[in-house]
Amino acid sequence: MRNIKSFFFLAAIFFSVFVVGCKDNIVSESDLQPPSGMNATFSSIQKQLFNTSCATSGCHTGNNPQAGLNLSEGSAYNNLINVQSVLYPNLKRVTPGNKEASLLFMVLSYNSETKMPPTGKLQQSLIDSVGAWIDKGAQNN
């Protein structure tokens, strides 16, 4: 009888440690929400990021955009989602549901050889918003 009590006691301790240790790896819907004041929607990212920092003269706009990537309104979404990168053919520009495999997130986070925008790293809240949008499926919303 004593061995059974010891077994259940040890099992309870193990289970408690396991649950507490794993709770940080659980992703909830709130983890995918953008920081306050930011919207993780494509339309918001188009207005707050692409229109102001990317689709500018000499960069990602016009007939001959850098890296063949036109981020102008009306063109950006179709040029990003599941499209292979010209510079990094083994990567897609945006892999819906996976920001870590998306070149857009890598270059904005300065986690690749290429860093965008070249004028300096964006505010972290904007980068987080792009990451949340990608992780939530990169919808055209």
Image: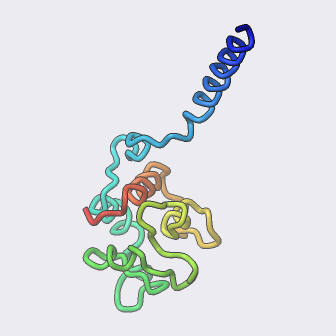
Which quadrant of the view contains residue 106? bottom right
The front one of 51 and 129 is 129
Scheme of colours in the image: rainbow
Which quadrant, please, contains the C terminus? bottom left
Residue at the location (58% across, 80% down)? 90
**Eyeballing the image, is 53 above or below 72?**
above
Residue at the location (36% across, 63% down)? 138
Q: Is residue 119 visible?
A: no
Left or right: 138 as drawn, with respect to 118:
left
Q: Whole-percent x and y of residue 12?
A: 63, 19
Left or right: 78 as drawn, with respect to 134:
left
Query: Number of marks in the image?
Result: 0
Q: Name, please, the residue furthest toward the bottom.
A: 63
Which quadrant of the view contains residue 21? top right
Which quadrant, please, contains the N terminus? top right
The front one of 29 and 67 is 29
Q: Whole-percent x and y of residue 126?
A: 43, 54
Residue at the location (56% across, 36% down)? 24
Which quadrant of the view contains residue 139? bottom left
Q: Is residue 8 visible?
A: yes
Q: Whole-percent x and y of residue 64?
A: 41, 91
Q: Whole-percent x and y of residue 51?
A: 33, 68
The front one of 9 and 86 is 9
Residue at the location (43% across, 80% down)? 83
**Eyeballing the image, is 132 above or below 57?**
above
**Eyeballing the image, is 95 above or below 28?**
below
